Image: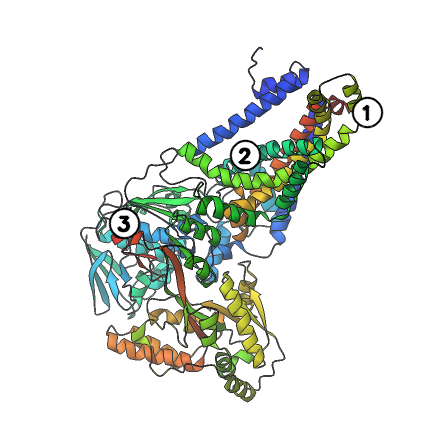
């Protein structure tokens, strides 16, 4: 097991370095100049003033020099300073990361609870009205763009019914900050979670249907086990492996989905930060964000590997 | 059933050794996951501050210039030295020496109670009741410090050149930092004297954009790195404006509280929360739900806003939409081609349809500064036949497609651009629309002098004094146009302090621009804002380039 995990970890580090080089190259060849986006279009700065700014920010050094300098500091947790806010990038990300984790984590929980249970019911009651309803709803959610769904939910639940706040992660001066934050979380997390739940319903249904036809299921029933036990212990556990893969590899989709949802709900997480930083050519922030997303993806696929080995001991031996 | 205590270490060890069942591991992972999510919520809840009394919350995203929604609240701070004083946060936290009346016709004092100009010496008498947010009195030393800071080449401030005619400015540009201007002095705590080396009646208009900074806080800071201080984005920030900085809630809002000793009277609104929406739809939804009192909007959202109970749309000048030309291009060097472009565009129709009435057709710069406007300017009313005749006279072949840049991100501008492209095509001028996404391609074309035309704005300006920046000698390097008569009229206007005499020269200068068309002036555009007028009272909005919240201390919000 240890050997297996170490091997996975080394893979992960190699991927991280590769991605950081790629992202650095992309930012490098993208048209644009951070200095221009730091100033309003009407500010008409003199070329000398711009040059002085470039020099001060170290933008005049060759690209490989800047990459190595950046990587050397990055491994020590120093990701440099944002070109626009002049704050340490690590600080900016550490403020935003918990908000995105909160949103994506809650969405994940919602999606697993809703998606897996709906999938199970759909599979067990194949071709029943409940299966048709679940199929219809999951295709409905899958085919509607997230921003549209987000705006609809805002209009219905925040503007018309007034059950939830329209935007943000908190209210200024709220009397109970914790409840206030949870209250803000419900709508965006639900929109984000239901998108993934729709996909999970389909995967769970397909995977369980496959397993239900297997020989060992017939054997389990032949042994006289109760149907519930047959489904949960023999059916679901075997159906779980592809579902874990789906959950783990949906993580990047959740993060990119969060960019849209965070913009619509004005949720102050990494998604909104990514949008603003990309618009402003704030490359230390863009680089760090790309790295952070890679890290999340690598960690989630690593966790999927660990989860496989827990669910199916044969894998850790392989 | 025995209870096992789980930590990550025991969990991993247990999993590896097989002591824990898979069910235990799953249960423990779930508990850890839920625990950390709750922990995150708790950690985030810290730093919230109670808000008692009258509160105003509004979307200040579009107050940041550029016509789009840059919406990064922290940008607003760091560039106060390099040009960020136009951001509403800074306008609320800081005070200025003088500002402009809401009708844009007169200068009015802010920190200055009165001023006079005698023999090229400006003397400002400061209010004696102005104090910084930390209680220290605002004195003449602060004004002197601010001017010295901005004119110090080490700060590379965009505002420094406002003082180019002050005695000692040229010397300071060559001196070691920290520099100080010999012409700027404080004879006593409440008097500032500025001695000019050359007459400059336009200097007052520069002060409108300059926020006075506290010498007792920033006086010893290294000027080359002053914009990088944590001061700008934390509650170390000290101003003399109507509201005090409380905190920046990253990605969400900026919280300000009333400055009770504000020199124009304590604000009635006790808490001011400035929001920065990335999406206009969400901002308007928040307005409808009562979570946001005012939302900057475009004419495309008019129908949406009309459906919101209690919402009112107000407007104020946003600056004139102009096509700037690169007169170094052979076709555009001929004034008949430039005039033809003015005749070819049906400004009236565009104003009525695309701007839905929230713009007026114009043909001169700063139309709202009425005293400086000539009454005989050519309106360049839509006349495609005249345009074709001028083009033919100029020998314009239309073989080359001219690039037409624009940088506003709103959908209305995109429609206006397409309309203008078609009007120009109708008289035989082919254009390619080029959107400047801030990536520097346009800047590069400007540096290479290969650009043709840009639709943009000179910004809503307080006085004609700044016209030289584009159409006078400083603008020649970019626009390739220079006119001795125009420069002579501007110099004459800047050399006199009598309004009537200035008016004559400014009107002549604007008349020359109107005739020579080094740029084509098109639409006097408006900023639109949807506000909850049932709740928001005594609110005076704009002029946008000076304030959005004008006389903010008098505003009230109904409970």
Label 3 marks a residue whose chain is B
Q: Residues within 10 Å of mark 1 (few under 14, many from 20)?
A: few
Q: Residue at x 58, y 84 (%)?
A: B396
Q: Which circle marks residue B240 in the picture? A: 3
- Labelled disc at residue A106: 2
Task: Find residue A215 and name its label.
Answer: 1
- Left or right placement of residue B107 versus residue A292 in this view: left
Q: Secondary structure at mark 3?
A: loop
Q: Residue at x 42, y 73 (%)?
A: B471
Viewer-nearest of discs 1 and 2: 1
x then y, percent, for residue B520: 46, 76
Q: Position of residue B66 (x, y in %)?
A: 45, 60
Residues at discs 3 and 2 both on one chain: no
Q: Label 1, secondary structure: give it.
A: helix
As helix, strand or loop, the secondary structure at mark 2 comes to helix
Are the residues tagged 1 and 2 within 8 Å (C-beta)?
no
* Discs 3, 1 touching: Cβ within 8 Å: no
For disc 2, the chain is A
* Residue A133 vs residue A284, the one in the foreground: A133
Q: Which callout, 1 or 2, points at the residue further toward the start of the chain?
A: 2
């Amino acid at each position: 097991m240890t050997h297996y995990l170490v091997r996975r970890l080394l893979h992960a580090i190699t991927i991280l370095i590769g991605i950081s080089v790629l992202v650095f190259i992309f930012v490098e060849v993208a048209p644009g100049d951070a200095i221009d986006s730091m100033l309003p279009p009407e500010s008409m700065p003199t070329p000398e003033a711009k040059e002085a700014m470039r020099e001060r920010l170290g933008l005049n050094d060759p690209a490989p020099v800047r990459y190595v300098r950046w990587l050397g500091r990055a491994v020590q947790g120093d990701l440099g300073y944002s070109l626009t806010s002049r704050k340490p990038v690590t600080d900016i990300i550490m403020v935003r990361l918990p908000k995105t984790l909160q949103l994506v984590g809650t969405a994940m929980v919602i999606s697993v609870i809703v998606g897996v249970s709906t999938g199970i019911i759909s599979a067990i009651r194949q071709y029943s009205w409940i299966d048709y309803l679940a199929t219809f709803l999951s295709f409905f959610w899958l085919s509607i763009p997230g921003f549209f769904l987000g705006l609809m939910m805002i209009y219905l639940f925040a503007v018309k019914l007034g059950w939830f706040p329209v935007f943000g992660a908190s209210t200024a001066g709220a009397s109970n900050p914790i409840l206030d934050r949870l209250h803000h979380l419900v709508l965006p997390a639900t929109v984000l979670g239901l998108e993934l739940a729709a996909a999970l319903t389909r995967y769970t249904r397909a995977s369980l249907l496959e397993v239900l036809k297997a020989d060992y299921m017939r054997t389990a029933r032949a042994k006289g086990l109760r149907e519930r036990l047959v489904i949960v212990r023999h059916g679901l556990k075997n159906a779980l492996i592809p579902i874990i893969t789906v959950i783990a590899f949906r993580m990047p989709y959740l993060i990119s989905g969060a960019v849209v949802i965070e913009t619509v709900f004005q949720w102050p997480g990494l998604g909104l930060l990514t949008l603003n930083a990309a618009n402003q050519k704030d490359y230390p922030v863009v680089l760090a964000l790309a790295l952070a997303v890679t890290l999340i993806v690598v960690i989630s696929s690593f966790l999927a590997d660990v989860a496989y080995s827990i669910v199916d001991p044969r894998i850790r031996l392989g | 059933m025995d209870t096992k205590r789980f930590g990550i270490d025991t969990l991993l060890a247990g999993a590896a050794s097989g002591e824990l069942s898979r069910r235990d591991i799953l249960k423990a992972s779930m508990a850890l996951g839920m625990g950390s999510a709750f922990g995150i919520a708790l950690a985030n809840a810290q730093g919230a501050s109670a808000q008692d009394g009258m509160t105003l919350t509004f979307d200040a995203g579009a107050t940041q210039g550029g016509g789009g929604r840059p919406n990064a609240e922290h940008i607003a701070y760091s560039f106060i030295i390099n040009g960020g004083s136009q951001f509403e946060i800074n306008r609320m936290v800081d005070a200025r020496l003088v500002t402009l009346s809401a009708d844009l016709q007169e200068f009015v004092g802010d920190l200055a109670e009165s001023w006079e100009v005698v023999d090229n010496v400006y003397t400002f008498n400061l209010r004696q009741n102005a104090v910084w947010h930390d209680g220290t009195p605002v004195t003449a030393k602060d004004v002197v410090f601010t001017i010295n800071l901005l004119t110090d080449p080490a700060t590379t401030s965009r505002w420094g050149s406002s003082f180019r005619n002050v005695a000692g400015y040229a010397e300071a540009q060559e001196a070691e930092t920290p520099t100080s201007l010999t012409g700027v002095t404080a004879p006593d705590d409440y008097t500032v004297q500025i001695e000019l080396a050359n007459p400059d009646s336009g200097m007052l208009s520069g002060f409108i954009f300059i926020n006075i900074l506290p010498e007792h806080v920033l006086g010893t800071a290294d000027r080359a790195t002053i914009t990088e201080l944590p001061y700008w984005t934390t509650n170390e920030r000290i101003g003399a404006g109507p509201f005090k900085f409380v905190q920046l809630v990253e990605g969400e809002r900026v919280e300000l509280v009333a400055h009770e000793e504000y020199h124009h009277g304590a604000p009635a609104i006790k808490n001011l929360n400035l929001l920065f929406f990335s999406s206009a739809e969400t901002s308007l939804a928040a307005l409808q739900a009562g979570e946001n009192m005012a939302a900057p909007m475009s004419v495309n959202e008019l129908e949406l806003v009309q459906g919101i109970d209690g919402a009112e749309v107000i407007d104020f000048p946003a600056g004139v939409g102009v096509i700037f030309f690169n007169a170094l291009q052979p076709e555009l060097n001929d004034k008949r081609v430039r005039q033809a472009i003015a005749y070819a565009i049906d400004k009236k129709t565009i104003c009525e349809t695309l701007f839905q009435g929230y713009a007026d057709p114009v043909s001169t710069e700063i139309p709202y500064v009425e005293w400086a406007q000539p009454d005989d300017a050519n309106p360049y009313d839509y006349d495609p036949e005249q345009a074709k005749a001028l083009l033919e006279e100029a020998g314009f072949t239309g073989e080359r497609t001219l690039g037409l840049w624009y940088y506003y991100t709103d959908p209305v501008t995109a429609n206006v651009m397409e309309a203008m492209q078609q009007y120009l095509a109708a008289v035989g001028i082919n254009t390619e629309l080029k959107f400047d996404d801030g990536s520097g391609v346009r800047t590069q074309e400007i540096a290479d002098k290969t650009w043709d035309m840009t639709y943009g704005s000179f910004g809503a300006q307080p006085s004609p004094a700044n016209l030289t920046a584009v159409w006078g000698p400083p603008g020649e390097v970019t626009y390739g146009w220079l006119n001795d008569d125009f420069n002579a009229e501007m110099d004459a206007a800047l050399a006199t302090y009598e309004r009537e005499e200035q008016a004559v020269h400014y009107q002549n200068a604007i008349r020359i621009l109107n005739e020579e068309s080094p740029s084509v002036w098109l639409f006097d555009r408006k900023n639109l804002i949807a506000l909850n007028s049932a709740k928001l009272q005594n609110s005076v909005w704009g002029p946008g380039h000076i304030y959005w919240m004008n006389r903010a201390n008098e505003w009230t919000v109904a409970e």
